[in-house]
Each structure stands twice: as C-alpha cells, then as structure tokens.
Amino acid sequence: MLSLIVPCYNEERGVLPFFEEAKRVFDGSEYEIVFVNDGSNDGTFQELKDLAKLHENTVRVVSFSRNFGKEAALLAGLKHAAGEFLCFIDADLQQLPETAKEMLAILEEAPQLDCVCAVQEKRREGLFSTVMKGAFYKTINALSDVHFESGASDFRVFRRNVANALLDMTEHYRFTKGLFAWVGFETRYIPYRASERQNGKSRFSFWRLLRYAFDGIISFTAAPLRLAVIAGIITALGSLTYLLVVVIQKLFFAIDVPGYATIVTLILFFGGANLFFIGVVGEYLARVFTQTKNRPPYIIKATINTGEQK
Ligand code: UDP
Ligand code: MG
C-alpha cells in the first residue's frame, strides 16, 4: 500500500482538487491519504472532515492545535501512515500525484532502491534566489559529512525502512532534506518540473527560507564552531607577530607607533568578531536548550479515521 502524506496549511481551496487528482491517479491501486492539518485558520479542517466522512477507507486526518510548521506535519504524517510505501507530497498540486505514481513504479521495479526523490528541474525563480540556493548547497556540502543533492525536494516516495529510520530521529529541529541525506539508503534522483501553484500562495517567504537554510546548516554540522577556533588561532598568531614587530621597533629603533586609528579599528573588529562567534555558540546552545526541554514537536487536537480516539 502507498501512503500519501500531505501537509496542509490554509489549503481550503487546495484540498479537494488534490484529493480528486490523487483519486483519479491511484484509483484501482491500494492507497491511503494522510492529511495533516497544520493549524490552518481557514476552512481546511472542515474540508478535510467532509472528505474523511465520504472516504472512510482512504482519507485519514491528523489536525494540530496550532501551526507547527511543515516539518512537524511531515513527522505526524509518518507516524499515522500504514503503507509499506510512503510519499511526501504538497497539497497545492505543484507536485503531481502523476509524478508520485511514476516514482512508485521505479521503486517497485528496483528492489535495491529505497527512495526516489524528485529534483526540481528548472527553477522558475529570480537570479537572486538561484544564487542564494547555490551558495547554500555549496556551504552545507563543504561543511557536512553527508551529501545534499542540489534542488532535491521533500517530494519523495520511499520504503517503510526509510520511514522507520526517519521516525527514529528524535530531533526537534527537523530539516527533512538533511534527515533523508543522513539516514542514507539507496536513493535515485529524478528530474521534475514544479507546476504553478493552483490556489493561494506560497508560505515560504525569502526570510523563512533563509531561516530554514540556517537551521539546516546548524543542525547538520558543527563546523561554524570550529571556525571560531581557527579564527582565534589565526588572530592570536597574527597579533603575536605584530607584537614582536612593535617591541623590536620601539627597543632597537626607537620608533614610536602612533596607534589611535589602529587601536580603534582593532577594538571594533575584534568586538564584532567576538559577538559574531558568541552568537554562533548561542545558536547551538539554543538548540540544546530546545531539545533538552523535550517538548513534543507538535500537539494533536483531533484525528479522523486513524484508528485512535482523540
Ligand atoms: N505547509 C505546512 N505548514 C506550514 C507551511 C506550509 O504544512 O507552516 C504545507 C503547505 O500547505 C503545502 C506545503 O507545505 O502543502 C508546501 O508549502 P508551500 O506550497 O507554501 O511552499 P512552496 O511550494 O512554495 O515550497
Ligand atoms: Mg507549493
């Protein structure tokens, strides 16, 4: 059976078209759709309730108490999906059920494969986004032990063993792309072209994406911390050399160094560098703090057709 896991945040107009399309594509095969309502404040939950009533066997609904973010929604979907094959897919029909079916076929034909991942072929984005994203993949691949495929989306079809591995990762900051890279398994990347969004608009603004990229780097490598050590060693050695130069000049050549500008510049520079690295350490510490509080990544308010009472 295939479980489609669909995170929905304010998708009241997207849910029904998505369901119709998925039904059209997968009718005749065994499948279920796990919709996760990520604290929408429009009519999404009502739409899902109506759907679940009509299609008790295929539609399951998990509804959060507030918006916890797409990553939390994907996790909840995983926990409530029963299929031996699973698929992460958006509710806005930018990722087509048709493509999911092709990805499933690839998996079924190749027993050695565990995961098929759709890679966005041609980005319909501005130059700035493209450059920023390129820089992100360069940075994270240079710093992290695992490989991040450029442009790889969350749109994937994978086997139960991958799902179980993802469920075993109990971290609070869930950078799904990174989790997939970290757990390994045999993955095939296939190109796909994202369609235009059917309804509503994207929730991922530039700042949210930047935050997301930053989270990804912090979650998957401690290299920025090492950077502080390296920068410290370099400046310490540099200043030692300069100290020698100044002392020798003073003692042997009686050259007084007029130092106001130098001192002010150095104080400001190292003040800045110090703050920067304290900030970096703080980012890691904040994650340790969040993780040790051990709060659940989401709170469920209601479930429908999932076989549990809540
Ligand atoms: N989404 C979610 N929670 C959020 C933001 C988005 O569950 O806080 C869902 C959204 O409903 C959609 C998917 O994640 O199904 C992708 O979101 P969107 O289309 O806004 O992002 P984009 O396609 O621009 O990456
Ligand atoms: Mg979208």
Image (spheres, helix red, strand yellow):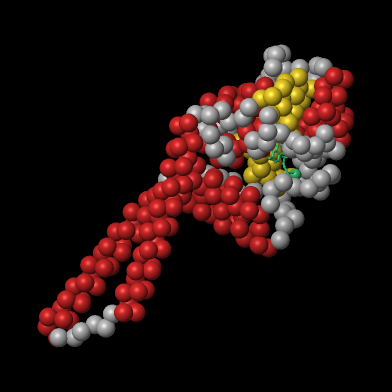
Q: Nearer the viewer, residue 305 or 183?
A: 305
Can you give x and y, in whole percent of width and height, for residue 186 in the image? 58, 33
Give the percent coordinates (x, y) of residue 268.
38, 69
Q: Quadrant of residue 81?
A: top right
The image shows residue 55, relative to residue 172, as above or below, that is above
Asked if one can make out residue 279 in the rendered structure from this viewpoint, the answer is yes
Asked if 306 appears above or below 220 in the picture, the reply is: above
Quadrant of the displayed image that contains ligand 1: top right
Locate residue 89, reporting x and y percent.
Answer: 73, 35
Residue at left offset 80%, top offset 20%: 58
| Residue 108 in view (yes/no) | no
Q: Quadrant of the N terminus?
A: top right
303 relative position to 25: left or right: left
Seen at 54% across and 45% down, the residue is: 216
Q: 7 or 123, which is in the foreground?
A: 7
Left or right of 58? Residue 237 is left
Q: Image quarter for residue 272?
A: bottom left
- The residue depicted at 41 percent of the width and 58 percent of the height is 275
Left or right: where 226 falls relative to 84: left
**How many numbered marks appear?**
0
Residue ID at (33%, 54%): 229
Depth order, front residue of 7/142: 7
Foreground residue, 124 or 288? 288
Q: Quadrant of the C terminus?
A: top right
